[in-house]
Image (cartoon, rainbow, N blue to C red):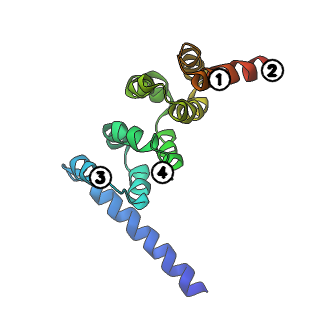
Amino acid sequence: MQILFDECIKLQDNLLDNIFLLSKCPNLVTLIEKNLIGDINASLLYIIKQLPEEIKISLLPNIIEIMKNLDGKTKLCQDIILSMNREWLKKNIWSYSKYVFDDQDYQSFGIFMYLFNSISDELSQKLAILALESDDEDVREIGQIYFDLSSKI
């Protein structure tokens, strides 16, 4: 058992060393983007989560696209986003994600409401107001639920 444990520690150390080396490669974002097409390996998302902030910011449009697909990687994408600087997210995440809301998709509004609740009340409220203005009854319900819960707190 101890040997197995030691081997796991060694593998993790090697992974971290390799991620550090990768983060120094000038074409890393392009390389990752090529691998974020089609069936995406969740291990790649775990690697992205450990990369420096500026690389995650460069990949944010890709992460948002993957997150909204509800294919089992949504939570991991949310975790990547939430690993970023909160103040930066408060100021910038809306501009990266607002196009998603044009589709008036109930699932997308739900995914982003969960994410925005973890970032700031202002973002959640902004999304809830947008949801209330939707033509889609299900999307409006997300906004209503947000304000119903907010009034009880």
Location of mark 1 (residue): 141
Q: Secondary structure at mark 3?
A: helix
Q: Residue at x 61, y 86 (%)?
A: 1
Give coordinates of residue 137: x percent, y percent.
Answer: 60, 21
Reading the image, the residue beneath label 4 is 71
- For mark 3, what is the residue? 23
Q: Secondary structure at mark 4?
A: loop
Q: Decide: is 25 above or below 66.
A: below
Nearer-N-terminus badge (3/2) = 3
Does the rendering let one see residue 134? yes
Q: Are marks 3 and 2 in contact (CB under 8 Å)?
A: no
> Could you classify mark 2 by the number of other residues whose Cα lies within 10 Å: few (under 14), some (14-19), or many (20 or more)?
few
Amino acid type of the residue tagged 1 in the rendering: Glu
| Cα gap from disc 1 to disc 2, whole angstroms | 17 Å
Name the amino acid, label 3.
Ser
Q: Amino acid at mark 4?
A: Asp
Identify the mark nearer the N-term, 4 or 1: 4
Q: Amino acid at mark 2?
A: Lys
**Percent x, y of residue 149:** 74, 23
What percent of the width, then of the height, locates residue 35?
A: 28, 55
